[in-house]
Image (spheres, rainbow, N blue to C red):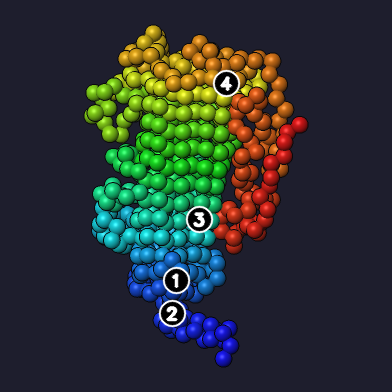
Amino acid sequence: MSQSIKHILLLGVLLFPVLASAKTHIYEGSGKETYNKKLKAGDVLVIPNGTYADLKINVHGKGKADKPITVRAESPGGVVLTGESWLRYWGFYIIVEGFDFQFAKPAKYDGKLRPLIANRRAGSSSTKALEMCHGCVLQRIRIDNESPQAIDKEYKWIELYGYENFVRFNFFGAKKSAKSVLQVQLKHAESEGLPARHRIFGNYFSPRNVGRSVGNGGEALLIGESSLQHVKAGVLVESNLFQDASIHGEPEVISNKSSLNIYRYNTIRDTSAGLTLRHGNENIVEYNWFFQNGIDGGSGIRIIGEDNTIVNNYIQGVAGGGKADVYRTALGQVAGYSKEDDDDHIDGYQVSNGNVLSNNTIVESAQPVMLSTWYDRDEDSMTRPPRNTTFTYNLVYQNGVQPWDKDWVRGQAISVDFTPNSQYGNEYGLDQAEYEPTFRKVEGNITDAAISNVVASGTQVRPDLQLKGCDAFRTGDIVYPSIDGAGANLAKMREPLTWTDKHKSPQLGPDWLNENWNGEIAGYTLCR
């Protein structure tokens, strides 16, 4: 017997137990039930194509990295879940894919409204990961056309628990109700002392603004919560598109409330909010696009906390606006609470210290860069300006757009307004800073508009600056390249993400909704 034949026979013997034990299970119900299924490594659960109302799918099991459990629609997008349907999955290495939620509404469990999808057993402990998911994948799902009966409810569409899970290539439609589309929960990570290390990749958060202000609580993505801000979550948020993706009245489309997270290669378009590091330390925001195009309330990146790194981002057309328009800035830091008020309020404003803001491009914005900003916070005092800020090689190109003539902007492209000598005289009254804002380094910045004297030694003011913009990625977005080392290096960035009738960016959203899913990513072409 030849050696190759022996090898084939041996391989067959080794594989036989796996093939014999792994099974394909077919759901045979018609909906309106709670379907519980325990699966083994390699098993596949198929839901036949059709529309199912009030079907609660609960699946658990111990898959393996090389033999995952799969829960899928018969064909991608062929299973429509309506009413109080939900998906619950927990265990190890489970892939959930291909489902289409339409006209869904939240179901109640133990008297509380629950999310449509969660990778945790309903009713299990939120502080222990025993019945949560590890190494699981939620992919190629659509949630859209929220039930009219759900619009006045407060609930999330997805809650993400456990460790090292993926949420990728999904379509999240117009969630008209309050609360976030996706929240990463971290109580178990805090109690067990482990980082969550999820990856949120290639998702489309579609237009959500229906002209109904809900105030706080209408963000697309929330990672953590105020009381868990020091949890080292380690979540990677990469290559997602947020398009008008927060309800009007909510200042944050992405709300970071934990530490050690990375936001990279995302695109935020025409959204009346921005990316806010609301709480937490050592987060990284890099290579992101913000095309706000003057939409009311639109902002860029707001930083609070310590040792955060904001580098190589491109921010265009921030208009500010809204009741609390002081912090609708393209790039900025807010003053922290006084020590006394900070100790009393875990959900307050912590001192910003040691943050790095480098090689960012800010274009044509009403509130461009604000490196130390105070605003009204009811009766609490925001008296501690940012400390030890690094502000280097940023390009602030106004191109004739005049920054707001407000106390906190003062017509400046780069403002540092909150010092002990500030005299606001506005409707909020006066507040007194405890000390001057401090900087670790200010150098290499370039702008074509007025600046604060505080940054004069490290900033070139060139009012005659002329930059040539072009459609460098062939996506219809006019962008301006860096100049003399200042600004974002566009060659290091991926193409801005788009989702229109004419073009959907490759590897964005479900492949069954995106005919261009396997297309080529546009390369950078130097503006000349």
The residue drawn where x is 32% and y is 15% is 434
SS assignment at label 1: loop
Q: Nearer the viewer, residue 437 or 423?
A: 437
In space, the residues marked 1 and 3 are separated at their CA atoms by 20 Å
- For label 4, the crowd category at 10 Å Cα-Cα, with few meaning under 14, some 14 to 19 and many 20 or more, is many
**Image side of residue 398 versus residue 12, left or right:** right
Q: Position of residue 173 (x, y in %)?
A: 51, 52
Label 2 vs 3, first from the N-terminus: 2
Given contact means CB atoms under 8 Å apart, are the residues at marks 2 and 1 in contact?
Answer: yes
Of badges 1 and 3, the one in the foreground is 1
Q: Is residue 27 above or below residue 444?
A: below
Figure quadrant of the C terminus: top right
Given contact means CB atoms under 8 Å apart, are the residues at marks 1 and 3 in contact?
Answer: no
Given contact means CB atoms under 8 Å apart, are the residues at marks 2 and 3 in contact?
Answer: no
**Image side of residue 462 versus residue 413, left or right:** right
The residue drawn where x is 53% and y is 28% is 358
Q: Looking at the rendered structure, which numbered label has been put on residue 349?
A: none
Question: Which residue is disc 1 drawn over?
Answer: 67
Q: Looking at the rendered structure, which numbered label has been put on residue 444?
A: 4
**Image side of residue 312 versus residue 185, left or right:** right
Q: Position of residue 144 (x, y in %)?
A: 50, 55
Disc 4 residue type (three-letter): Gly
